[in-house]
Image (cartoon, rainbow, N blue to C red):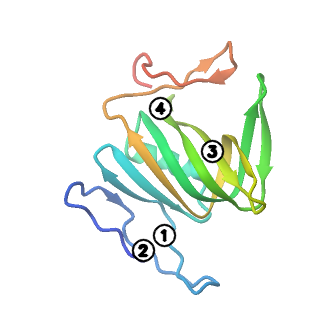
Amino acid sequence: MRLNTPVRRTARDKTLLNSVTKVGPRNPLGRRPLHEAMQAVRDGSRWVLRLDDGQDLFEALSEFALREDVRAGAVVFGVGMFRSATFGYWDGTQYRPHDLSVPHEVVALHGTIARQDGVPSLHLHGAVAGPDHRLVGGHLLRAKVGMLQEVMVEVFPGRSFGRPMVESYGLKMLDLEPPGDA
């Protein structure tokens, strides 16, 4: 299957976003660029998303959660590449950031999607491998997609997760049964 062909609707679920390939100038490898916007296809409560080069991971996933009214979800997996990223390590009082300025292969990406104050709240962790094949990982603070990122999201229809601040830890933590509408 060619990557730059449109994704076809399935008979089971006709939900599809941005299914038409955008044609643009060829890159140095002679291939046309893929989509400039996220592709998404749904099967029941599962979504498979494809993000393309240059997209901000958090912005793209937040826009998806808003558009599809995801109030409770899990990022089951993600693979692809980050052009740049910042991982954090929680030292008990704050995140110590570690910036990656060269592309790294994403070998693991997972987390949760909640709502806080009416907007999506993402909590993502991941692991990436650099050109030296060493792994780096932790709490993902920011990431820019390099080439592509494939993500599977499982949603929980009818549920809302919250992410209130828990002062004793100094962190916003997942609440599976928040009071009212998160």
Q: Residues within 10 Å of mark 4 (few under 14, many from 20)?
A: few
| Nearer the camera: disc 4 or disc 3 | 3
Write the residue at 66% across / 42% down.
140
Q: Is residue 31 above or below residue 122?
A: below
Q: CA distance from mark 2 to mark 4?
A: 32 Å
Q: Which mark is residue 126?
A: 3
Location of residue 25 in the rendering, given as x and y in whole percent from the top left corner: 56, 84
Residue type pointed to by label 3: Gly
Q: CA distance from mark 1 to mark 2?
A: 6 Å
Q: Residues within 10 Å of mark 2 (few under 14, many from 20)?
A: some
Single out the residue that lies furthest toward the bottom: 30
Q: Is residue 40 above or below residue 157?
A: below
Q: Secondary structure at mark 3?
A: strand
Residue type pointed to by label 1: His
Q: Which residue is mark 2?
A: 21
Q: Which mark is residue 118?
A: 4
Q: Secondary structure at mark 1?
A: loop
Q: Which residue is mark 1?
A: 35
Residue type pointed to by label 4: Gly
Q: Is residue 170 above or below residue 47?
A: above
Q: Are marks 4 and 3 in contact (CB under 8 Å)?
A: no
Q: CA distance from mark 1 to mark 4?
A: 29 Å
> Mark 4 or mark 2, which is nearer the start of the sequence?
2
